[in-house]
């Protein structure tokens, strides 16, 4: 027996708020075109499947294991997060200041990989030297290492500008916690360190220069941290 048109538009919701799922299905069902039985069946089937999926999702019992720690007798989830450094945007009063900063960033990005490599190589060389007791063998090893480094990186370092060279000396201190003068003195002796310091002074360099990230080298440190964080 066909449903009346009056019944097909009637909506009765008990109480306030949204109707429950069964009542919604019945309302949609009665409001469907009564002359199109296949379409009614398709629509009702779709809504039944959709309702069943919602029920399954609401009953999801997936468990995720989290590390935890006990605080005053209660077990609480504890997750270690990586540190995040927030860098304020740079503000410059003149175009010249902005250009100077851009040049500093360029120079640091150019020499920073060499400084990091210097830290790694120095550690490796010291580890090998600790196993060599014979002074002659130590000198031969240092000479061989020097030739290998010169063949691999000599041309690039010799082509560095004056500003890049000064930054490299600073960053080597940052990576090794030792000035270039101290490194040369430890590896090749006091006379060699004195000679290279005197020679470097002729070109305006100071192998005894230290790194002061909270003082005069604060700008360099900021750029290096941004590079490490992938911000630039």
Image: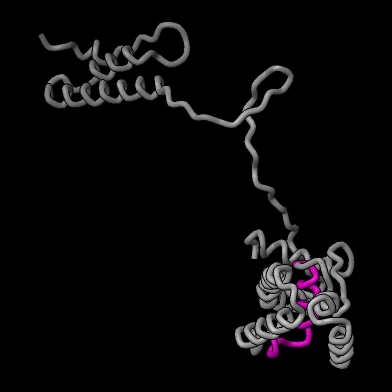
The residue located at (84%, 73%) in the rendering is 179
Q: Position of residue 232 (x, y in %)?
A: 64, 66
Residues shaded magenta: 157-175
Magenta segment's dominant SS is helix
The colour scheme used here is one colour
Magenta region includes residue 165 = yes
Residue sitting nearer the eye, 140 or 88: 140
Q: Position of residue 195 (x, y in %)?
A: 87, 89
Residue sitting nearer the eye, 126 or 181: 126
Is residue 58 rendered to the left or right of residue 71?
Answer: left
Determine which quarter of the picture holds residue 53: top left
Determine which quarter of the picture holds residue 200: bottom right
The residue located at (64%, 90%) in the rendering is 155
Q: Position of residue 198 (x, y in %)?
A: 89, 90
Is residue 60 rendered to the left or right of residue 87?
Answer: left
- Residue 29 visible to the viewer: yes
Q: Position of residue 70 (x, y in %)?
A: 68, 23
User: Residue most toward the top?
Assistant: 14
């Amino acid at each position: 027996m066909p449903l009346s048109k009056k019944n097909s538009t009637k909506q009765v919701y008990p109480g306030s708020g949204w109707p429950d799922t069964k009542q919604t299905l019945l309302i949609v069902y009665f409001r469907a075109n009564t002359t199109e039985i296949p379409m009614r069946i398709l629509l009702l089937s779709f809504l039944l499947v959709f309702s069943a999926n919602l029920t399954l999702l609401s009953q999801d019992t997936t468990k995720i294991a989290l590390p935890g720690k006990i605080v005053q007798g209660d077990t609480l989830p504890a997750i270690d997060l990586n540190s995040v450094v927030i860098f304020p945007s740079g503000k410059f009063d003149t175009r010249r200041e902005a250009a100077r900063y851009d040049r500093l960033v360029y120079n640091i990005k150019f020499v920073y990989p060499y400084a990091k490599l210097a830290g790694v190589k120095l550690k490796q060389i010291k580890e090998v030297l600790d196993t060599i007791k014979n002074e002659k063998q130590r000198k031969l090893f240092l000479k061989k290492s020097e030739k290998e480094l010169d063949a691999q990186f000599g041309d690039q370092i010799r082509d560095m500008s004056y500003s890049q060279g000064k930054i490299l000396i600073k960053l080597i201190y940052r990576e090794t916690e030792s000035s270039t003068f101290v490194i040369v003195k430890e590896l090749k002796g006091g006379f060699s360190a004195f000679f290279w310091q005197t020679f470097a002074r002729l070109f305006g360099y100071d192998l005894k220069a230290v790194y002061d990230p909270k003082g005069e080298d604060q700008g360099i440190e900021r750029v290096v941290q941004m590079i490490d964080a992938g911000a630039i």
